[in-house]
Image (tube, helix red, strand yellow):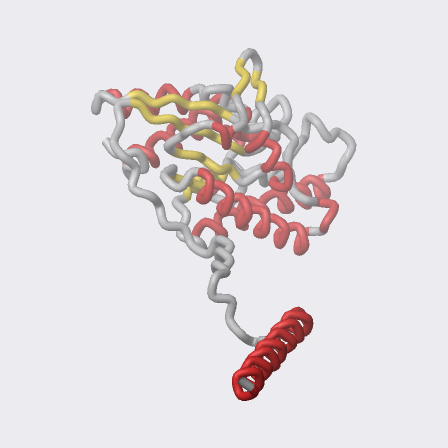
Amino acid sequence: MRSAKKGLVAIVVIVGLLLVASITYLLIKPKIQIQKPDNLPQALSSPSPTPFVFRTYTAPIIEKKNTYTIFMIGDSMTHALGPHGGTFDQYINELYKKDNIGILVDNYAVAAINILSVNDVLTKKTTYWNSTFEPLLSRDYDLILVESFGYNPLSQLGTEAGIKSQNIALGELMKTLITTHPNSAIVFVATIAPNKETYAKKILLNISTEERIKQSEERIAYIENHISYAKAHNIPLVNIYEKSLNSERDGELKYINPTDYIHPSFEGVDFIGHELANFIYDNQILPR
């Protein structure tokens, strides 16, 4: 009988000890932390995407269509062609008509803007005479023609810093166009050359010939840099600038409007239209 009682007491003591141990563990458990090494990889986190950096251009394969859409951007030198490209629209449709293909042209070029304002052209509505275009990036297109904006240089920065800013802006522009419209072609355009001694003759009346030459050379620097950028980055280029030079490598006057000696004349507009149309057609930028 005594042994039975002793056994019962032992069981009670053991159970009590177990209860005390359990309660103690529960009380100290929240304070116990397992330290992880600082360099332990986060297995569940996904790697950050690598931002796109434009280095060189690879033209996309354009699907053959019955109708193509071309957009144009630039300054007043391209604005002069009209809201739908004027003679350029006429000539390129004449060429592609032989292949039963139609071309639609919308000209987003804006007068008196420089390359640093190009984002406004891409993201805001553009009104040209009685035509209003939705923001360029909101629409589909097959080809965009990027003129140099060279007649509106970044004079406030000085030529060296301005050219660097032009290059940065062109890189950002290419990045935007490629990432938003990867299946659309990009072609750079170098517009007609200024004539140094007569530049802005009917607009800037009281400046010396030396100042005219200085201002025209500043614009030439931006146009030539646009050409160099295209060549360095494998971007197709319509080099109208080179073809508009006379035997003295100055701007051919017949292509320049005599009412201001800045913008293209009627013959200049016609010349630009032909050069653009022939380049696109001959190089099959838009397949036929």
Q: Which of the 4 image quarters holds residue 216? A: top right
Question: Is residue 245 found left or right of 207 in the rendered image?
Answer: left
The image shows residue 194 at horizontal and vertical percentages of 57, 37
Q: Judge whether residue 275 can be spotted in this image.
A: no
Residue visible at 57% across and 23% down? 126
Q: Judge whether residue 16 can be spotted in this image.
A: yes
* Number of numbered discs on residues: 0
Instruction: Answer above or below: position of 98 versus 213.
Output: above
Residue visible at 68% across and 44% down? 154
The image shows residue 279 at horizontal and vertical percentages of 34, 36
The image shows residue 158 at horizontal and vertical percentages of 71, 51
Residue visible at 27% across and 34% down? 63
Nearer to the camera, 267 or 186: 186
Question: Is residue 103 found left or right of 259 in the rendered image?
Answer: left
Question: Is residue 90 found left or right of 241 in the rendered image?
Answer: left
Which residue is outermost to the right?
Answer: 206
Nearer to the camera, 3 or 241: 3
Residue visible at 46% across and 27% down? 139
Placement of the C terminus among the 4 image quadrants: top left
The image shows residue 272 at horizontal and vertical percentages of 44, 30
Q: Which of the 4 image quarters holds residue 10? A: bottom right
Which residue is outermost to the left?
Answer: 99
Nearer to the camera, 190 or 284: 284
Which residue is outermost to the front?
Answer: 1
